Structures are given as structure tokens and as C-alpha cells.
Image (tube, rainbow, N blue to C red):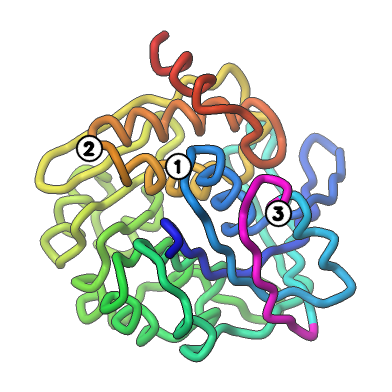
Amino acid sequence: MFDIAMIGHLTIDIIRVNNTKTEIPGGAVYFSSIAAAASGVDVLVRTRIAEKETVYLSEMTNAGVTVNNLGSKNTVCMNLNYSDDMETREITVSNLADPFILEDVKNIDASIFHLAGLIRGDFQDDMISYLSKKGDVALDVQSVLRCEKDSKLFFEDWVDKKKYLPFITYLKTDAAEAEILTGESDRYKAAEILFSWGVKEVIITHMSELLVYDGTFHRSPFTMKNITGRSGRGDTCFASYLAWRKDHNIDESTKYAAALTSIKMESPGAFSGTIQDVKNRMAK
């Protein structure tokens, strides 16, 4: 049995910032799996990419992640154009991969099932209720809010949110996504609303802090010295929280995830540090 099974698409990300273009692997499962593995848990990634691009899986396998590629005609390709401060971005999609279906997850045994989708339609909503019978479900809400049309991405509310949120143990959102779900611009109030709809632990990332709500607020600031590694912030934060939550309480997990994510944001790519690095940052 794995500690965390992550289901989602690896992407090829073309990043443009300050007139510089970089092509790197990306996607929620990329950033998430490496951060979780570095935090000491056993991680499975089940993904779909084209056979010709399986070289992009090597960084995850080298980090100790078990990777199952189910194959796809295409690999998702994202074009990310960041503002100079890297806090806002415009994303377009060049290719989409085949979606995941229930048959893809029936033979997985894990304590936590992390649905790390990129776009609505990567999996059907009934996968949430199905997996909740096998373990704890962790959902990144971009999986159900972010939509694609004519290569453009946009966000719209999740119609069946109140039906499926009670099946979710860990819900990750940022402040903007939380407002779409709840209509509340105050992220603290939004967290309370999401909790009242049945989520057990609401995880909200913001440029300044990580906020977790389980009936009590837990928060920890981000302490990065720069944001050259801004891409993947939310994915890294959510996964490191889930990994540390295995053997630690919510408050400790919040502090750990904020510290690890702060380190990651100081360098492009996935987290490349150690647990001791994170503990050292937490002690500052």
C-alpha cells in the first residue's frame, strides 16, 4: 500500500517571464510527487503522457516515486506567461491528454488518493465518491474549476460541489479559487464555508501564507527570499502538507509545508532539498 497515490497529468510547461523562455516538466503530479517523496512517504503517480515523451518521467522516478504511465496520444502542453513579479500568469494549452476513468484507479491501494487534475474533465466527479471508500481523498480544486475552450483557460464554479465536498478529507484551493466556490473574498470566511459544506481540512494558499482550517485556523507564513521558483507553489505546498500529515498534527504540518514551499520557491523546478533543510527553515 502506498501512503499517497496521485492521479493526474504530467505536462510540458513552456514558461515565459522577463522575456526569458524555459521548457520544463510540470503539472501537479510532478511538483507534488517529488515534494511528498522528499518528505519521507511512499508515493505512486498514475499519469498519462505520450510514449515519445516518457523521458520527462525520469525526475520523478529518480526521486523515489513509483510512476505508472497509462499512455496517451498527446502530452499536455501548457504555455505559462508570468508577470514580472511572478504573482499573476496567463496560461494557454497547446495539447490535452486522454482523461482518467474509474478503471484506471480500481487496482490502487493507498491511504490518501490525491486527485491532481489540471482541467475539468481530467476525471469524472464520481471518482471522488468512489475513492473515498478506499481511502482519504485529497482534491486540488483546479481539477474541477479550471476549464478549457479553444486553448484558453478560464474558471467557473463547480455545480455539484455540495454533493461531492463531503467525500473530501483534504481540499486545496488558493484565495481566488475559494472565492469562486463560495462567493467570499475573505479567505478566512471562505475556509469556514467550505468546512461547513463537509470538507474535513481546508487548505488555502496565498502569496503570504498557508492557511488550514478544520474548525480551528492554523496558519504559517511563507519566508522565501525570492520567487524565481514560483511555478508549482500550490502543488508543492499541498503535497508536503499531506506527506507530513501522515505522522503529525495539523499545526505542525502547516508549518512544515509552508517552510518546504518557501525553500522551493527560491529555485525553479521541483523541490530539491531535504527534511533537515525544512526543519532548519522552520527553526528560523
Residue 155 in the image: x percent, y percent? 48, 68
78 versus 147 height, above or below: above
Tell me the residue that label 3 is attached to. Answer: 61
Q: Earlier in the sequence, mark 2 or mark 1?
A: 1
118 versus 133 height, above or below: above
Marking on residue 249: 2
- Farthest-out residue, top: 284
Q: Earlier in the sequence, mark 1 or mark 3?
A: 3
**In which image quadrant can residue 209 be found?**
top left
Query: Which residue appears at 28% of the width and 30% of the height?
Result: 252
Nearer to us in this view, 14 or 235 = 235
Name the residue type under label 3. Answer: Thr
Q: Is residue 97 visible?
A: yes
Name the residue type under label 1. Answer: Ser
Q: Are marks 1 and 3 in contact (CB under 8 Å)?
A: no
Query: Which residue appears at 63% of the width and 69% of the height?
Result: 9
Nearer to us in this view, 54 or 186 = 54
18 versus 117 height, above or below: above
Name the residue type under label 2. Answer: Asn
Marking on residue 282: none
Magenta segment boundaries in residue numbering: 60-73
Q: Earlier in the sequence, mark 3 or mark 2?
A: 3
Tell me the residue that label 1 is attached to. Answer: 240
The crowding category of the residue bearing disc 2, from other C-alpha atoms within 10 Å (few below 14, some 14 to 19, many at least 20), is few
**In which image quadrant can residue 136 be found?**
bottom left
Q: Is residue 91 left or right of residue 19?
A: left
Residue 163 in the image: x percent, y percent? 21, 81
Q: Is residue 17 left or right of residue 226?
A: right
Q: Are marks 3 and 2 in contact (CB under 8 Å)?
A: no
Query: Which residue appears at 43% of the width and 65% of the height?
Result: 1
Nearer to us in this view, 111 or 32 = 111
Question: Element at badge 2?
Answer: loop
